[in-house]
Amino acid sequence: MCGRAPGVPHVYRVESEQARWLVVCSPSGFERLVSEAAEFAGSPTLPPTSLSVDPARVAKIAAAHGIEILAPSGTLPSP
């Protein structure tokens, strides 16, 4: 469930070679951010490991949807 919890940082981590992720958002709106930030895969395969993400682009899109990126992708909170 991805709810709007202002001021509550969160992160997701996949710890296996393969994962499936079902996201249900209420209220709606997060799907617009995902759609805008996504790149069409072209085929039903995993992306190449060389695929790069432009953090500035993602942060700009997120900001336009009221989301603040607090750390680079893959950063985990301190224990």
Image (cartoon, helix red, strand yellow):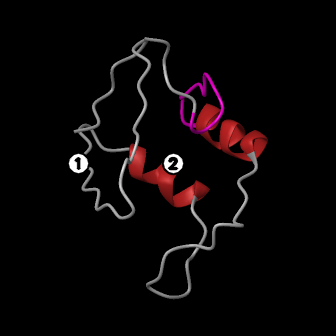
Which residue position holds label 1?
24
In reply to whether residue 49 is colored magenta, the answer given is no
| Residue 19 percent coordinates (x, y) | 32, 61
Closer-to-camera residue (73/60): 73
Which span is picked out in magenta? Answer: 65-74
Closer-to-camera residue (27/13): 13
What is the quadrant of residue 2 in the picture?
top left
| Tag shown at residue 33 | 2
In reply to whether residue 70 is colored magenta, the answer given is yes
Q: Is residue 78 above or below residue 11?
A: above
Q: Residue at x 49, y 53 (%)?
A: 34
* Amino acid type, callout 1: Val
| Residue 62 percent coordinates (x, y) | 59, 37
Q: CA distance from mark 2 to mark 1?
A: 14 Å
Callout 2: SS: helix
Q: Residues within 10 Å of mark 2 (few under 14, many from 20)?
A: some
* Amino acid type, callout 2: Leu
